[in-house]
Image: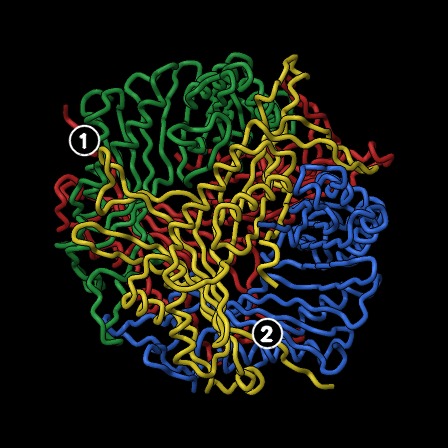
Chain colours: A red, B blue, C yellow, D green
Amino acid sequence: MDIKLVQNDYGESRVRLFRVMHRGGLHEVKDLTVSGRFEGSFGPAYTAGDNRVILPPDTIKNTVYVLARQYPAEAIEDFAFHLVEHFLTYNPQVSRVTLEITERPWSRIPIGEKGHASAFVGNAGERRAARISATREKTSLESGIQNLHLLKTASASFEGFLRDPYTTVESRSQIIFSAETCAHWSYEFPEPEMPFSTMWHGIRKTLLETFAAHESKSPQNMLYTLGHAVLDNFEAIAEIQLTISEGYCRLVDLKPFGMENENEVFAPAVEPRGVVSGTMRRNGKLV
Amino acid sequence: MDIKLVQNDYGESRVRLFRVMHRGGLHEVKDLTVSGRFEGSFGPAYTAGDNRVILPPDTIKNTVYVLARQYPAEAIEDFAFHLVEHFLTYNPQVSRVTLEITERPWSRIPIGEKGHASAFVGNAGERRAARISATREKTSLESGIQNLHLLKTASASFEGFLRDPYTTVESRSQIIFSAETCAHWSYEFPEPEMPFSTMWHGIRKTLLETFAAHESKSPQNMLYTLGHAVLDNFEAIAEIQLTISEGYCRLVDLKPFGMENENEVFAPAVEPRGVVSGTMRRNGKLV
Amino acid sequence: MDIKLVQNDYGESRVRLFRVMHRGGLHEVKDLTVSGRFEGSFGPAYTAGDNRVILPPDTIKNTVYVLARQYPAEAIEDFAFHLVEHFLTYNPQVSRVTLEITERPWSRIPIGEKGHASAFVGNAGERRAARISATREKTSLESGIQNLHLLKTASASFEGFLRDPYTTVESRSQIIFSAETCAHWSYEFPEPEMPFSTMWHGIRKTLLETFAAHESKSPQNMLYTLGHAVLDNFEAIAEIQLTISEGYCRLVDLKPFGMENENEVFAPAVEPRGVVSGTMRRNGKLV
Amino acid sequence: MDIKLVQNDYGESRVRLFRVMHRGGLHEVKDLTVSGRFEGSFGPAYTAGDNRVILPPDTIKNTVYVLARQYPAEAIEDFAFHLVEHFLTYNPQVSRVTLEITERPWSRIPIGEKGHASAFVGNAGERRAARISATREKTSLESGIQNLHLLKTASASFEGFLRDPYTTVESRSQIIFSAETCAHWSYEFPEPEMPFSTMWHGIRKTLLETFAAHESKSPQNMLYTLGHAVLDNFEAIAEIQLTISEGYCRLVDLKPFGMENENEVFAPAVEPRGVVSGTMRRNGKLV
């Protein structure tokens, strides 16, 4: 019997970085969590415990800190480009580097009309995300929004669906649509210094406004409408992948207590959840 | 040997309630988690399995839904008053009712200058909270803000402290002050229909602005300044209890890599955390 | 207006300690999380930012590590005694020290009939806990079991309870009783070097066996029976506080699909949960 | 511009199932969480809100309950086979069904030498898992162990590794090796009624004993040794995928306090973590 290692990678995950840029008294903060992973010809490390080609994962952590000091990248995508370039330049033993960065947003504390220069309030479970995966030949880049919690109390229905003998859910012309949404998109021609942050905020705004305006017939239908709006409005985006995790809000039956309940009182459930995902792409432009 | 039950209570926790109020097409949403607990003479239920005085916890859940339909209370404090009154009125076997309500905030999705009538985006781990505990003689009420994440990158130091042989932390004239803050306050004369929501938003604003403005010498000093500002500005508040859980942000030593790090690159730690708590009160007005 | 600080404490929470004792090749491991808190006359630190009486919380962390090296205490209660004694001896500015320690258990990996000398498998969300709170005059000590997940699929009912107009839950002669249980107990005469670990394991065994054997009429009834068994069997225990958080397991209605469901298929719910707590004490021995 | 939906699926996640099989008075329990997902020609649902081919996700939940009643499958793999067969038989609109099942283990409460017939104690964050993905032509099946927490306090080193200018970690002949391990394996010829549970317990035992016995030179080396041992001992297994997430245990420097620390006192860190993954396969038997 011959046993082979057919895939392997290693790295450092959950490196926490907090960076303050001082622009005079005005501070800009970045609160990031970084994971880096290497692929390469590491066979002897696995099979024989030979560590000579293994750069310790701890070094990935140090490199994150050093490059955060060297390159004051505003966008996490640009920080990811710098990290990938560094690792591929100095590590011939590595054939592919994958970086994942998530950013926790902090807002300036409002003081009158303005935001404070150096005091912030944390908001949202929402995260901005980037993922880059690169060999010396090819780089793929994805940006994303994670944990965007959206909710509609009107203009959402679920009707006319297929029924089988185990279907008990009723057709409803009006539902509470609670949609935890993740969106990840890739670019036609990704390169450093694109206006990543401007695009990110524009895409977020598009998702919110489309979600609000769309008369939803199903999560599938909503997902498609969201993706279409992003691709329509952002030419630099080649593809978008969306996932909607729907939390069910059960209308409480108050009849046993002699009351009507006209879409007013609901019991939200943690479990189960409906999940819909889909990927949309401009036709013909990608292989 | 004689064994006695010296304290007992029971109830239902984590009842989830989502309520939509329709004001024409304008929807107002409340996303609440409610816990209710009873004290009373339940001894035989414990000692002999005699359930005749035990109202099932499930009934607390139903009552939350029924009263959410009957009383369109805007403030969770008022909803708590209704629940307490109901339970004390209809349950002679109960001597004390305690209710805890937390509210998850939802913001209207902005459309131009306005918010959408029925589409929302969830924000923040932040929660609004209320706690009421009442007998037929006396009611105590507390309101609160939980999980308020505050951050200062300037105007915070920690110097001149006591040292013992196991003290290694260095005096620092400039620290990143990351403060997860909880505030709970009680009222001089609590009663239904006080402007609870207006006060809540005012207190939140006071906490944020005071946090931003104060030159912090320690978490203790910050806590006191926050509490003082609230008591100064809100006469209806009798007492405030504050807790600050401080997350440490270690300045990364970049000297091994030939670099300076002038308060720019930090490594935040999950654990351990510093914790400071304190209660402040107007003197002489309370026993 | 005169504002006073009426209560305060501070400290360090979530200090993580992993300790290996080498008994020849046989290793014994302790995986602990420690929180320590000081009360004292710290007023000027709060009101004026005067840190001269503030021992930094970071020093609590260092002290945990130093004392873990000095005192190879097997029981967390004994480690807590050492920490408290240290802090009260060397810190005249401190009037009360409170320590909370939780222990995550690791089991030896079984090799044949025996356990491996230095390889372990982690088990359970279950935790062993101790809490000590001491002034220079008086020490109170509590030990505990947290997150003990117990389950009965027979010999549990809930019948004959009180009904009001909002009660819909049905009387059931057979329920799935899923009980997340916490127990904390204090001692008649707490002092170092009591057989804390032996007692802890004995109490855990008593709780399990009593839970299994008891014909439960309600969570209240189960709680009392558990507490009684512990006080009956462990004379050194003065008082026990128990909490049972009950997860509801709904019998799925399969009639719409033409099937019976005789207590076989259930849907467990995360929320809401029933909660019962009670404190039991030997009569006459305590004030 | 032509926008296309290039991938889509939907389903129901986190369906909770608790099943009791009564074998006389002896109860056997299954505590499962099930997710099911459909792929198919659902285009019009996405693009036009046409729900006529959409079986509601809620029906997946009902089907899980119905089939749990019909088929008293002991192994989650067999339950997965039944679910997949059902969905592919009755849903021509579905081209691929994917099921993921995780099982939370419950142990009988020990009473003397035996386990209690109907009382259980929950253990471990550990989970048993199965994943099946099937079209009408082909079925792939994977079984797994998730969250297996393993720990070695001897026979683990990390030395002789590559260093670059940002490498600061020191070579160590003795480390605490804390390895959160996940293993997923597939079968040469998967089919219903294989001895899945026997294999699962055998593989778990092999992982534990190999972890204990192996002199680890790196997580990579440990991973390979674990995978090799499983493939060596279980002929029915075609491929195994392993991931080790390593939690760092820092040796605390006690020199500032005048003490040695000979691998006794450590500070475990939550973040960052090292991650190693690898897939191993019998050579030549698979394409």
SS label for mark 1: strand
In this picture, is D14 found above or below B159? above
Mark 2: give few (<14), some (14-19) or many (20+) Cα within 10 Å: many
Amino acid type of the residue that numbered disc 1 sits on in the rendered structure: Lys
Judging by the rendered image, the residue that carries numbered circle 2 is B278
Circles 2, 1 touching at the beta carbon (< 8 Å): no
Q: Chain of mark 1?
A: A
C275 vs D250, nearest the viewer:
C275
Which residue lies at the image location 39% right of the left edge and 34% below the top edge? Answer: A287
Q: Is residue A27 visible?
A: no
Quadrant in the picture for residue C284 = bottom right
**Which disc is residue D95 wearing?**
none
Amino acid type of the residue that numbered disc 2 sits on in the rendered structure: Gly
Mark 1: give few (<14), some (14-19) or many (20+) Cα within 10 Å: some
In this picture, is C78 found above or below B65? below
Residue C149 lies, in percent from the top left, at 50, 40
Left or right: where B139 falls relative to C66: right
Q: Chain of mark 2?
A: B
C123 vs A31, nearest the viewer:
C123
SS label for mark 2: strand
Left or right: where B231 falls relative to C15: right
Same chain assignment for discs 2 and 1: no
Which residue lies at the image location 20% right of the left edge and 31% below the top edge? Answer: D229
B73 vs A210, nearest the viewer:
B73
Q: Is residue B43 visible?
A: yes
Residue B177 lies, in percent from the top left, at 48, 73
For the residues labelled 2 and 1, the Cα–Cα distance comes to 61 Å
Judging by the rendered image, the residue that carries numbered circle 1 is A4
Residue D233 lies, in percent from the top left, at 21, 25
C39 vs B168, nearest the viewer:
C39
Quadrant in the picture for residue C222 = top right
Left or right: where D174 falls relative to A62: left
